[in-house]
Image (cartoon, grey):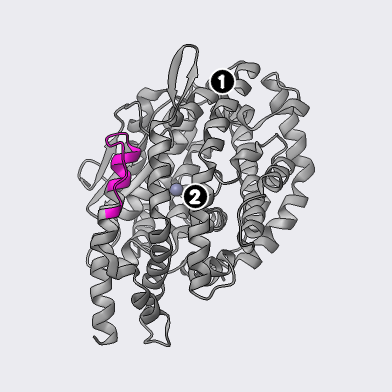
Amino acid sequence: MKGKEFLDSLDHEAEAFDSAVTREHYLNRSGQKDDLALEPIFRRHQRLFSRETVEALSGPHLRDPRLRPLRELAIFGYLEEAARPFTEELAHRETVDTASWNGQEVPYRSLWTVVMNEGDAGRRHELDRLRVELSAAQNGIRESRWDALYARTRELGYRSYYRLCDRVGDLGLESLLAQMEPFLWDTDRLYHDRLETHLRSIGVAPAQAERSDLSYLFRASQFDAAFGSERLVASLEATLRGLGIEPERLRSVRLDVEPRPRKSPRAFCAPVRIPDEIWLVISPHGGQDDYRALFHEAGHAYHFAHVKRGAPFAHRGLGDNSVTEGFAFVLEHLVYNSAWLQEHLGMDDPSEYLAFARFHKLYMLRRYAAKLQYECELHQGSDVRGRAKRYSDLLTAAVGVRYAPQDYLFDVDDGFYCGRYLRAWTFEAQVRRYLESEFGETWFRSTRAGRCLKALWALGQRYPAPRLIRRLGYQGLDARLLMEELL
Ligand SMILES: [Zn+2]
């Protein structure tokens, strides 16, 4: 088959595969299906990830822009194929494992929600210990899964998983690390000072603080009254209308708010068919966190729902996820916009909430900077075992609360997704600065701003974030704006 025809047929098959996998994940994570049956889907589309396809896409090639995203899919699929039994086992365990608490069996996936709502520090630590124990008991599966991924990495001729992700995913890990290291230094004092104040406000002595205390702190129930659940979906719809988007006419975005016991507590967006069937799934547990999660996932959903129909799948559904994460943060950030808070939630003086939100952002960036550092070290090695202490040391130092060493694999996403987030925060700060300078602080009320966003959304992930940002007049991704607002 000639180059172009070969890529055409791969592109079609990639779409069928991705759609089936995303639907399966949607059903499992939304609690409608206990198992995650990926095996038949991978078998049906085996050709996408065969060694022959990987090689055909890796040779010297025609300059087709679909090549890079399709190669990335093929290589990560080739790796995942070897890891799949462990991925499925893990998903099953995470769905069915339970812990006994107060005479009740709490599902593993609900534990985090219970932890963040537990006001008593002693009980919270005890509960989190139950979560960590369950997670630790699953670690053998995680270790075997990484063994399988690493073995295939070497088989493809890459020295390490770090090297593979950096090359294939075009992440620029070295320069990202070089930007984040001074960030950790520069914000250290400020962060730890604020952390201490916040911890004392919830009655926790800084020396005794654990990760679960931050999930309680960031649950921030003191703001619940301002972030009522009855306005949650309505405020999103009103915001979209302000941007010239009619949510009721855009039938492709479907909201799943139904409570189910095995539904993942983390909100997520499942773009099953781009741009025609996009699921927006949330598990409301109340308060500002729900608003942030809904607006973030809505950012993904409306991004995918506006992608130009008819573009190759490689540009609609593959490519640099920093782009869709960046747009997710653009909407999420409205919840930190003083004018938005006044207009949509009727908050008279949002200053206390805004200070809290800035601290949260700083925490996120420091946590992800430390994760990046840890994952770079982890994935330069050839065995994930024995890294638990290093994980705990790095995260505890950057975040200032104790991280359980047992989470050393639970807290790692495939393919350096932490790097995509860090790039996305940078991208978002630049997009937002552009929107503010063109349309003012109340850009969310401007249909012209909406048109500008829709024009960018239409491109899907055709361009990686560093190139897409050039359309707004920047030279490339630049973390300075982000640092400025935090310092
Ligand atoms: Zn996201």
Q: Which residue is drawn at 63% across and 27% down?
A: 213
**In the structure shown, which secondary structural element does the residue marked by tag 2 occupy?**
loop
Q: Which amino acid does label 2 sit on?
A: Gly
Q: Distance between the residues labelled 1 and 2?
A: 30 Å
* Amino acid type at mark 1: Gln
Task: Check disc 1 and report the residue beneath it.
Answer: 222
Q: For the residues carrying marks 1 and 2, which lies nearer the camera in this image?
A: 1
Of residues 463 and 145, the one nearer the viewer is: 145
Q: The N terminus appears in which quarter of the rendering? A: bottom left
Is any part of residue 400 visible from this angle? yes
The residue indicated by pointer 2 is 440
Image location (x, y in percent) of residue 236: 36, 37
For marks 1 and 2, the one nearer the N-term is 1
Residue 229 appears left or right of 197: left
Q: What stretch is highlighted in magenta?
A: 24-39
Q: Position of residue 175 (x, y in %)?
A: 65, 67
Q: Which residue is nearer to you in this view: 421 or 113? A: 113
